[in-house]
Amino acid sequence: MKRLNRMVSGIAALAFILPSFARAEDKSIYGDDNRLDYFEAPADMKELARSVVSLWKNEHVRVDGGTARVATANFGEAVGLCPSERFREQPVGAFCSGSLVGEDLVMTAGHCIVDEAQCADTRLVFGYAVTERGKAANTTVPAADVYSCKKIIKRDLDKPPTGTVGLIGAIVGNILDTTGPDYALIQLDRKVTDRRPLPINRGSKVKQGTGVFVIGHPVGLPLKVAGDARVRSSKFMRAHFTADLDTFGGNSGSPVFNVKTKKIEGILVRGGTDFVKSPEGCTVSYSVGQNDGKGEAVTHVSVLKDYIPSFKSAPETSKLVELSPEDTEFEPLERTVSFD
């Protein structure tokens, strides 16, 4: 407990990763909490999930021989969760999510990888998940499942407007609802040979009412699949669409899939308040009705489809491998973890 107190100090130490409790606008949970661990997901979603990756700071990943271990904190203790909160005993540590869209290409949010310096300071880890009921999350994975960010291929991030021209642009943008894109396409240090590049929608933009689901790492947790969501708004001139997806910080960069086609429709980039303080003083997930709130923002994959190569075939896949914590020696995180 003493070591944990040095690492974080409840909500106060993690305040910079959580939106202000006083500015609850958009919500994280819409209706029922539909997040599932990897082992709970349907077979077709499990296959897709194998190609979703977690992003970590270099210093939080240790490779030793043929294994690698990620440094994590206990979710419930780090954020001061109420006893009833889901996943409170699971680890947290990843700061963003991404998806494999080429042999050595990962797509994520533009605010997750802001420049080449952050690219060089990022490790990408596949297989950070709960693979079997009753077992702990894989915080130890084969070293072959850990990659480095070699370079940024393409990146865009809508910046806040400045000056008179910027103010006029912002007003027009609000009227037309044309929020800019937020994405990054990065190249890995080597090709991924045992996971399938995920297909993207290369046709028209997704329509309002379309069923969608998201796969990623909310709050840096082990991989979660969240479905039972629909597109709320998808306008022609807009670089993003909104959907009632159950997502949190850490889901930034997560691929959002079409339920019918299983193709990526976009990248989860923005949301609202994740947590609020309960009357008892502990922390709970912020939630509303399925049709309430503004919805989560997803950058249309169409804005970067020209930079993602088409592929005809995919490599053979294998199950996620679970290694025991004893396979490597690594101390838990002793510094505050940040999530995007």
Image (cartoon, rainbow, N blue to C red):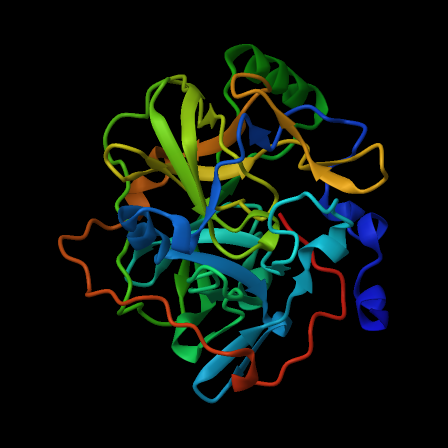
Give residue 328's quadrant in the image: bottom right
Q: Position of residue 35 (x, y in %)?
A: 49, 42
Residue 183 shows in this picture: no
Determine the residue located farthest toward the left in the rendered image.
312
Residue appearing at x 36%, y 67% in the figure:
320
Residue appearing at x 28%, y 39% in the figure:
263
Q: Is residue 272 above or below residue 262?
A: above
Residue 170 shows in this picture: yes
Residue appearing at x 56%, y 50% in the figure:
112
Q: Is residue 172 above or below residue 279?
A: above
Q: Quadrant of the N terminus?
A: bottom right
Q: Position of residue 249 (x, y in %)?
A: 61, 44
Q: Is residue 66 above or below residue 121?
A: below
Determine the residue located farthest toward the top in the rendered image.
175
Q: Which one is nearer the viewer's eye here, 195 or 160? A: 195
Determine the residue located farthest toward the bottom in the rendered image.
65
Give residue 195's quadrant in the image: bottom left
Q: Which one is nearer the viewer's eye here, 150 or 277? A: 277
Residue appearing at x 41%, y 30% in the figure:
228
Q: Is residue 162 left or right of residue 229?
A: right
Q: Position of residue 39 (x, y in %)?
A: 40, 55
Give residue 208's quadrant in the image: top left
What number of labels is visible? 0
Determine the residue located farthest toward the front in the rendered image.
134
